[in-house]
Image (cartoon, grey):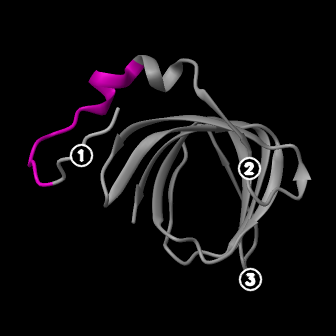
């Protein structure tokens, strides 16, 4: 679902509109770009999108990749699974279902999905 009118000031109640989509089947998106460990296959669904932001559900099977100069900020909550994220120059952190965090624009680090992850995300460009 896409909403093109970013100027419309209205509440978008994603949980009410898309509760089944968050828990249900997702569209196959293929192997995670830049994967260098395992075979991280991604899938997802976009629930809301404008020029300024995107919200959706993303899932990824085990594997790893580096991220260099992340192009947008992203807030997320893990719905299931576990992943180890390592910010460049910092100790790794393991995230699991229920954990909420933000990766800022410009972030450099590494993702390693340990158990298939499903997350709800909001990306701000």
In the rendered structure, find residue 89 and report the number of the disc placed on it: 3
Q: Is residue 59 left or right of residue 111?
A: left
Task: Work out whether 62 lies above or below 32.
Answer: above
- Distance, label 3 to label 2, CA atoms, is 23 Å
Disc 2 crowd rating (10 Å Cα; few below 14, some 14-19, many 20+) is some
Disc 1 crowd rating (10 Å Cα; few below 14, some 14-19, many 20+) is few
Front residue of 58/28: it is: 28
Residue 50 placement (x, y as % from top left): 30, 52
Q: Nearer the viewer, mark 3 or mark 2?
A: 2
First of labels 3, 2 by sequence position = 2
Q: Is residue 57 left or right of residue 43?
A: left
Q: Nearer the viewer, mark 3 or mark 1?
A: 1
Q: On the rendered image, what quadrant is the C terminus found in?
A: bottom left
First of labels 3, 1 by sequence position = 1
At 49% from the left and 73% from the top, the residue drawn is: 105
First of labels 1, 2 by sequence position = 1
Front residue of 8/78: it is: 8
Disc 3 crowd rating (10 Å Cα; few below 14, some 14-19, many 20+) is few
Q: Are marks 3 and 2 in contact (CB under 8 Å)?
A: no
Task: Work out whether 90 lies above or below 19.
Answer: below
Q: On the rendered image, what quadrant is the N terminus found in?
A: top left
Residue 119 lies in the magenta-colored region: no
Residue position marked by numbered label 1 in the rendering: 4
Q: Which residues are magenta?
A: 7-19
SS for tag 2?
loop
Residue 17 lies in the magenta-colored region: yes
Residue position marked by numbered label 2 in the rendering: 32
SS for tag 3?
loop
Question: What is the total number of numbered labels drawn onto the structure image?
Answer: 3
At 18% from the left and 53% from the top, the residue drawn is: 6
- Distance, label 3 to label 1, CA atoms, is 39 Å
Q: Are marks 3 and 1 in contact (CB under 8 Å)?
A: no
């Amino acid at each position: 679902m896409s909403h093109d009118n970013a100027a419309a000031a209205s509440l978008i109640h994603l949980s009410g509109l898309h509760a089944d989509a968050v828990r249900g089947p997702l569209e196959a998106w293929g192997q995670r770009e830049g994967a260098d460990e395992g075979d991280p296959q991604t899938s997802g669904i976009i629930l809301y999108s404008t020029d300024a932001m995107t919200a959706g559900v993303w899932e990824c099977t085990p594997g790893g990749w580096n991220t260099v100069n992340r192009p947008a900020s992203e807030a997320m909550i893990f719905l299931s699974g576990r992943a180890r994220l390592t910010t460049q120059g910092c100790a790794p952190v393991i995230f699991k279902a229920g954990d909420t965090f933000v990766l800022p624009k410009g972030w450099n680090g590494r993702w390693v999905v340990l158990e298939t992850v499903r997350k709800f995300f909001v990306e701000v460009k």
